[in-house]
Image (cartoon, rainbow, N blue to C red):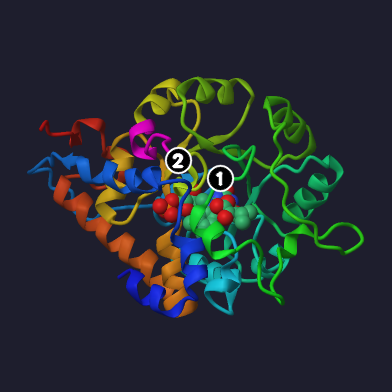
Amino acid sequence: MVDEAGARRRLDPAHWDFFAGGAGDERTLGANVEAFGRRRIVPRVLRGTGERDLRTGLLGCELTMPVLIAPTAFHRLAHPDGEVATARAAAAAGTVLVVSMAATQPVGEIATTGALLWFQLYPQPDREFTTTVVRRAEAAGCRALVVTVDSPVFGRRERDLRNGFLDLPSGLACENMRDADGRIRDIVMDEGLSWDSIAWLRSRTHLPIVLKGVLHPADARLAVEHGVDALIVSNHGGRQLDGAIASLDALPAVVEAVGGRLPVLLDGGVRRGTDVLVALALGATAVLVGRPVIWGLTTGGADGVRSVLEGLRTELDRALALAGAARPTELGADLVAVPRG
Ligand SMILES: Cc1cc2nc3c(=O)[nH]c(=O)nc-3n(C[C@H](O)[C@H](O)[C@H](O)COP(=O)(O)O)c2cc1C
Ligand SMILES: CC(C)CC(=O)C(=O)O
C-alpha cells in the first residue's frame, strides 16, 4: 500500500532525508509511531453493524472519511506534478488537502482540481504580506486556514544540515509567497507569534481558523477562549521540538480540555487504518497523514496518493467492522487499552 522503500530508491538522498527526517535525535519522530504501537484495541462483538459509514463533516466540509492530507512542503521535489497531483487524489478520494504555505505550485492552480482545500499559514512578521497570502487562499476557494503554531523558530533538522539541504533547487519555488510585486519571499518563522496574532488573523478573515501544533491542554482551553474553530494535536511530525510528547499521547488531555466545544484532529505517526481507529476512539474527529502521502506521490503521482488514501479507507472500514462499530462516532476510549509490562 505505502511503498516507502520505493520512494527512497527514487528520491535524491538529500530529498529523502528532508521528507523522512525529524529534529535532533528524532526521538519524537519515532515516538509518534511507537505510541500507536503501544495501544491495543478491545473490540466489541455481536453488534450487527452491517454497512459502515465513514463520512465525516468538518468545518462545513463533507468528507468521505475521517482522513485528511497534512500540509507538507515541496511536492514538486517528490514528483513533477507536485501539489496538483496530490489535490487530484484528494478530490478523487473525497477528502481535504491542506495546502502547505511552502507548496511549489500556486494555490489557485491547485484549486482547479476541484479538491476541497484548506490553506496552511505560517503568519509572517509582515502582516500586510500575511494578508496578501490569506487573500490568495480565499480567492482560490480554500475553506479554512490552518495556522501552524509550533514553529516560532525552525526545528534543528540535522540530516538537512549534514546534507547542506537549505533551499529548493533552481526552477522550484514557494509559489504562494509572491508579494504584490510578484517577488517570491522567503518563509520566516515568527518568534513573536502569540494569541494576539491569532486575534489579529480572526479580525482579517471569515474563514474558519484551525490551530496546528497544540499539545498542552492549557493551550487547548485558550484556543477555545480565542474563538478558534478547530485544533490539530501535532508535533509537526517530529520536525520541530525533539523530545516533545507523541501526538497520540497528548490527545486525551487535549480532548478533555476542549470538552466537545471544538473538533480535535491529530497528526503524527498515522500509518494504518487501525491507527485511525485508535485516534478516533481516543477522541479525535479526524486524522491527517503526512509522509505516507509523500511516498505515494513519489512512486505514483496522483495515482500513488490515491492508493495510499484508499488503502487507509479500506483498512479503517475493516477495523471498524472488526471492532463492532458502524461509524466513527460510535468509537469510545473504552476500545483502547495500554497493556502493562
Ligand atoms: C516533508 C514534510 C514537510 C512538512 N511541511 C509542513 C509545512 O509546510 N507546514 C506545516 O504546518 N507542517 C508541515 N509538516 C508537518 C505535517 O503537516 C504533519 O504535522 C506531519 O507530517 C505529520 O506526521 P506524519 O508525517 O508522521 O504523518 C511537514 C512534514 C513533512 C514530513
Ligand atoms: C520548509 C518548511 C517551510 C516546511 C517544513 O519542512 C516543515 O514545516 O516541516
Q: Which mark is residue 242?
A: 2
Q: Position of residue 79 (x, y in %)?
A: 54, 77
Give the residue furthest to the left. 46
Residue 302, given in percent of the width and then of the height, sits at: 49, 75
- Residues tagged 1 and 2 counted as in contact (Cβ below 8 A): yes
Q: Is residue 337 above or below residue 17?
A: above
Q: Identify the residue at horizontal 79%, vertical 46% (top origin).
A: 130
- Indicate left or right for 14 with 7 as reference: right
Residue drawn at x 32%, y 56% is 271
Measure the alpha-carbon separation of dots 1 and 2. Answer: 8 Å
The extreme front residue here reads 162
Respond yes or no on whether mark 1 lies under 8 Å from ligand 2: yes
Q: Nearer the viewer, residue 177 or 265?
A: 177
Tag on residue 50?
Answer: none
Measured as percent of width and height from the top left, residue 12 is found at 50, 76
Judging depth in this view, the residue of 301 and 207 nearest the camera is 301
- Which of 273/241 is in front? 241
Q: Magenta segment range? A: 242-251
Residue 98 seen anywhere in this rendered image of the structure: no
